[in-house]
Image: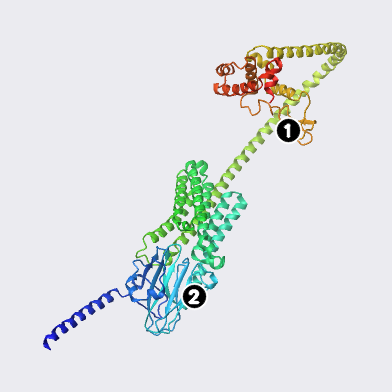
Amino acid sequence: MSNKSKPIGLSCWKSIIVLFCLLNTLASKAQERVLLQDGISKHIFIYKEIESFVDTTNKLTIKDVIKPAFSDKFKPSKTFTPTNYQYLHNGWYRIKINHSQAVKNSWILEFFDQTIEEIHFYTPDHQGAYSQQSFGAARPFDQRFYFHKNFALNLDTAFKGDRIYYFSVKSSHPSNVMVVLKPVVSYFKYALKEYYLFGIYYGMILIFSLYNFMMFLAVKQKQYIYYIIYNLSIGMFEMSSNGIAYQYLWPDSPEWNGIAFGVMLYLASISSMLFTREFLYTKTKAPTLNKLILVAIGIRTLFFGACLFIDEQLFNYKYIEIIPLVICYFTGWYVYKKGYRPARFFVAGYTFLVLGVLIRVVKTVYPYNLPFGPANFYSLSFCFIMEMLFVSFAISDKVRLLKKKKDKAQSRMFQEIKLNQLLKDNQNKELEKQVLLRTKEVIAQSEIIKSQNEELLNMNELLNLKAEEINKINEFLKRDNIELQTDIEKVSQARVMSKEVDFTEFSKIYPDNNACFKFLAELKWNDQYQCRKCGNVHYFEGISPHSRRCSKCGYDESVTTNTIFHNSKIPINKAFYIIFLMYSSNGKISSYKLSEILSMRQGTCWAYSNKVKKIMDERKKELKNAGEKGWSKLVLL
């Protein structure tokens, strides 16, 4: 008996030691519980008060996660409040609330991130079974229990003791899992105060927009339209981000609500850069930065197209807006350093905006030990208001500067008008003196002129008789000259067409475009005009020289249409001479010789001479015995 009792006693001691170690381990890892107390207005679940793990299979149910085997998979939050960065998988969370104390208040649980698409909340009953409540941004707004931008549900305090609540979160973007325990009274008090502040905030944005619209009506500058679009886009972005837009503007459109913030952010970014260009006169004051802004607008638009038509998940990369913000901020500093004073308010406003973005970046990149509060939660909204305020100052300063310049210009103009009037008065007095002196001289000379006029009348009668005789002689000479000139032109043209002449002599026959066009018109329509479109034979003068416009269909045919000169890039008289030389030399003159004669590029002469040579080869039979008519056979196509 004594031999068997020793090993049994040793075994019992070992079991006690193992059990003690296990209990000690569980106690060290036990989740902290939150005690319901009527004296608190709210409690945020932080650090060890909220535990989580990620279901990479996306298949686990509440029956699976409440099993003891899953207890060790839940880990306490390492940040002030957990954030689900693995948004492709279900995130499971649990909180422990103690109902031991008697409480009079009704309590709710509120989820502050209203962009979470699916939340399934599981509440235990006294038998250990769990009931499910589902809500999220992917569901129509009217399915919520409370008509509020945040998700909220009532907490059942009927059962006493520690109660563990589970909930799963799934979204298409990183989610901030901030759970707050509040009495219902505090919840409504905070909600009313928050909505009151929202009304002030969005009212200020509307006031800024209305102010700029009035400025646009007064000044008629498109920069105010850009800034109105920017203000309204920022307002809509804020409403889309905090859930107000989903609550009041599109409560039945969860799909649009998922991308509305990205669309509004794009409009705000583009309108901000366009406003910067117009307000700071970057075309003249900073040409390089102006080109950089245009490139940024193009790239941002391409990225927006990729977000909209390729992958809507790209909308989650909000911090791409830092690039346009930095460009606008640097442009403001640069233009201010160049001496443009209204830019100082622009820089001040964007300094607040940069500060707000930096706070948001710090919250995202380094969330550890960063407590929740209005100062950091609404910091960007406050910075937006300050930016709009200072930019409004900048716009007013710009208008004041323009008014000052206008007043100075008007003052200068009035001084010039006054000086001109004084000069005009002095000139009028001097002219009056000169007119009086001249009048006396004219009266004295009028008598002399009167006697001379009588003599001139007699002479005029004799001159009229001589003039009639001279006119008759001139008419005979004019006829002879016309006939002689016509004969000379015919002889010259015949000489040009029949033998080799230089370009100087050739230019006398076709000295300008008009002479060339006149020749082409006679060559084209020597027989009779006929419209190429409808066959009509009646025409009016066309728009270009020597062109003809159909009186029926209105087709205007230029003189070079359907000729070798159509769409030619070289002067038409030189083109005439190239054809003449090619025809007279039977196509044997080189492009180098043509370049030397006409002072043109050899490549141009080579291309055009080849075009003529090709037509000569095609019409070799027609040109064989054409003589002088060979010219026209090369011109018309």
Q: Quadrant of the N terminus?
A: bottom left
- Residue 224's x, y, as percent? 57, 52
- Which residue in the rendered view is the most extreme toward the front? 621
Q: Amino acid at mark 1?
A: Asp
Residue 192 visible in image: yes
Q: Quadrant of the C terminus?
A: top right
Q: Which mark is residue 188?
A: 2
- Residue 367's x, y, as percent? 37, 63
- Residue 118's x, y, as percent? 47, 68
- Residue 442's x, y, as percent? 79, 21
Q: Is residue 140 above or below residue 492?
A: below
| Snapshot colouring | rainbow
On screen, residue 443 versus residue 365, left or right, reads right
On screen, residue 463 versus residue 352, left or right, reads right
Q: Which mark is residue 362?
A: none
- The residue at 73%/33% (across/down) is 556
Which image quadrant for residue 55? bottom left
Q: Amino acid at mark 2?
A: Phe
Q: Secondary structure at mark 1?
A: strand
Residues packed near mark 2 inside 10 Å, few (<14), some (14 to 19) or many (20 plus): few
251 or 532, which is in the foreground? 532
Say if mark 2 contacts mark 1, CB within 8 Å: no
Identify residue for label 1.
556
- The residue at 69%/14% (across/down) is 497
Q: Is residue 188 above or below residue 383?
A: below
Q: Is residue 438 above or below residue 161?
A: above
Q: Is residue 61 above or below residue 280?
A: below
Which image quadrant for residue 469? top right
